[in-house]
Amino acid sequence: MTTTRTSVPVAAHSAVPAISATGLRKSYGDKLVLDGIDLSVPQGTVFSLLGPNGAGKTTAVKILSTLVTADAGELSVGGHDLAADPQAVRAAIGVTGQFSAVDGLITGEENMLLMADLHHLPRREGRRVAAELLERFDLVEAAKKPAAGYSGGMKRRLDIAMTLVGSPRIIFLDEPTTGLDPRSRHTMWGIIRELVADGVTVFLTTQYLEEADELADRIAVLDDGEIVAEGSAEELKRIVPGGHVKLRFTDPAAYRSAASVLSETGLPPALGFARSGRAAAGDALSLRIPSDGSQRELRSILDWLDSAGIEADELTVHTPDLDDVFFALTGSAAARNDQPKEAVR
């Protein structure tokens, strides 16, 4: 399958990527799940993989965390070749899946100590690590209680605490906040930020676009087994239509003057200037100028205002949000092919 891919360049990173995949492919029978995707995740960052249900997000996580074998591709995690040394990869990573690994029949502390045993930590060391993590995740008061009685947010915190027992430098979080209430979700975001501040690399899959916007240094949009766009949240927002600069006026005369000059301007058509709005009283007077929100276009607009002797009372930049990006880039090849050609490689 061949498709266009919208991409923005990533800054060069001197260190070896925490996660690297080239030509990753996976099929289940006749179903092609991952169609030769490429990924590069710098160390100490949050990389988010977005996509609709069935796009292949969880399959990518399972492959990169050694739970499933790829059909093809050159894969490296933590500097280790996934095919040649999967055991070294497992020693470097932690995985929190969509479904909790917490055993509800035993206490939170016992869940932690079980993980310590699985990591072959000495008994005293295991107890120290468990106690530190239970305190870090605010689970000390509940530590002696069966985990079955924990709230969804508490179970998720315990799940991640268990993942950290082995001190992994790379963590895969597969939809970690699904089903959590807004307060618990924000608590989880704080935990993820703390992990990254400590130098941990987080590979995050999520269906919450706000979550990717808040946390991710870089986002890849996966649709029908292919990465159709990649960049920072702000970069992705600029590749879909709908961005504009809004000029607001309180003086009707200034508004009319700006609208008249704007309609007659000979500025380059690439700037996409257009007149909109209607004369009204007070601060309802505004003009909208299509713009991708880039520094270049904003500078051009400001230069135009200065040269025309126009002073707006307020200038605001509006860009599409990740919802717009998601709907524009997923669901059909036609939607992807409608994107601006200069943003496609």
Image (cartoon, helix red, strand yellow):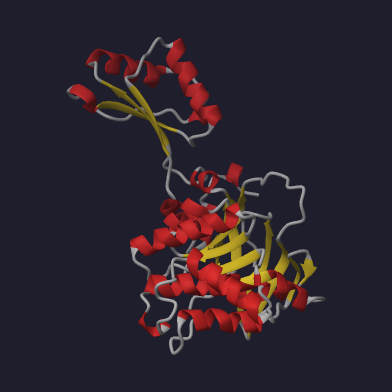
- Estimate the x, y position of residue 194 in percent, counting from the top left: 54, 55
Q: Residue furthest right?
A: 84
Is 332 drawn above or below residue 287 in the view shown? below
Q: Residue at x 62, y 77 (%)?
A: 126
Quarter of the image for the N terminus: give it: bottom right
Q: Is residue 243 or residue 295 the one in the foreground?
A: 295
Residue 165: x and y in percent read 61, 73
In the rendered image of this protein, does residue 23 appear above or below residue 340? below
Instruction: Place residue 68 in its image quadrant.
Output: bottom right
Quadrant assignment, res 253: top left
The answer to whether 260 is drawn above or below residue 57 in the figure is: above
Q: Is residue 15 above or below residue 269?
A: below
Q: Residue at x 69, y 44 (%)?
A: 11
Q: Nearer the viewer, residue 290 or 195?
A: 195
Rendered location of residue 96, percent (x, y)? 55, 73
Q: What number of labels is visible?
A: 0
Q: Quadrant of residue 318?
A: top left
Q: Residue at x 23, y 25 (%)?
A: 283
Residue 96 visible in image = no
Viewer-side residue, 60 vs 226: 60
Left or right: 22 in relation to 133: right
Residue 23 visible in this rendered orientation of the protein: yes
The spot of residue 29 in percent (x, y) is 63, 86
- Left or right: where does residue 264 sit relative to residue 166? left
